[in-house]
Image (cartoon, rainbow, N blue to C red):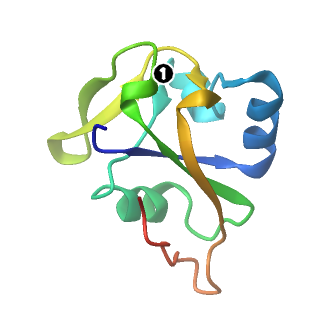
Amino acid sequence: MAEPIYKIASKADWEAAWVAGELKGTAVDLADGYIHFSTAEQLAETLDKHYRGQSGLVLATIDPDLLPHPLKWEPSRGGALFPHLYAPLPMAAVIAERPLDARGDGGFDLPEID
């Protein structure tokens, strides 16, 4: 298996994706035209920058080998390469998921990631 990647979504978006069998994207994904992911190393910064103080989130672990389309690794934040998917995310590629809520100070305690 390739190194897993991670997707953060609201519980409502995630539940709708399970019903549909795929995640077409969160609001920011739909606006940008691709699904945003993070690597394990990028996850804490992504949470702090885009989700600080939020609760009702889901952190999903994705196996890139189970995606029907290749990821594109594109620069963001200071040139770091982030994985993007220019297609819906099939829920069959999800290998783990867990709820994620911000602490009182707005930060996150990351679970041990796969």
Q: Position of residue 43 (x, y in %)?
A: 39, 58
Residue plotted at (45% across, 65% down): 48
Q: Is residue 9 above or below residue 2?
A: below
In the picture as drawn, the residue positioned furthest to the front comes out as 1
Q: Position of residue 7 (x, y in %)?
A: 51, 44
Say which of 64 and 54 sits in front.
Answer: 64
1 sits to left or right of 103 = left
Callout 1, which amino acid?
Tyr
Residue sitting at the far left: 79
* Location of residue 86 with respect to 25 vertically, above or below: above
Q: Nearer the viewer, residue 75 or 23?
A: 23
Q: Which residue does the image show at 36% across and 62% down from the upper left?
A: 45
Residue at 48 percent of width and 72 percent of height: 110
**Mark 1: few/some/many CA within 10 Å (<14, 14-19, 20+):** many
What is the quadrant of the N terminus in the image? top left
Q: Label 1: which residue?
A: 34
Can you say whether 45 is above or below 78 in the image?
A: below
Residue situated furthest bottom in the rendering: 104
Q: Position of residue 108 (x, y in %)?
A: 52, 75
Asked if residue 101 is positioned above or below residue 38 in the image, the reply reads: below
As helix, strand or loop, the secondary structure at mark 1 comes to loop
Residue at 64% over, 46% down:
9
Q: Quadrant of residue 91?
A: top right
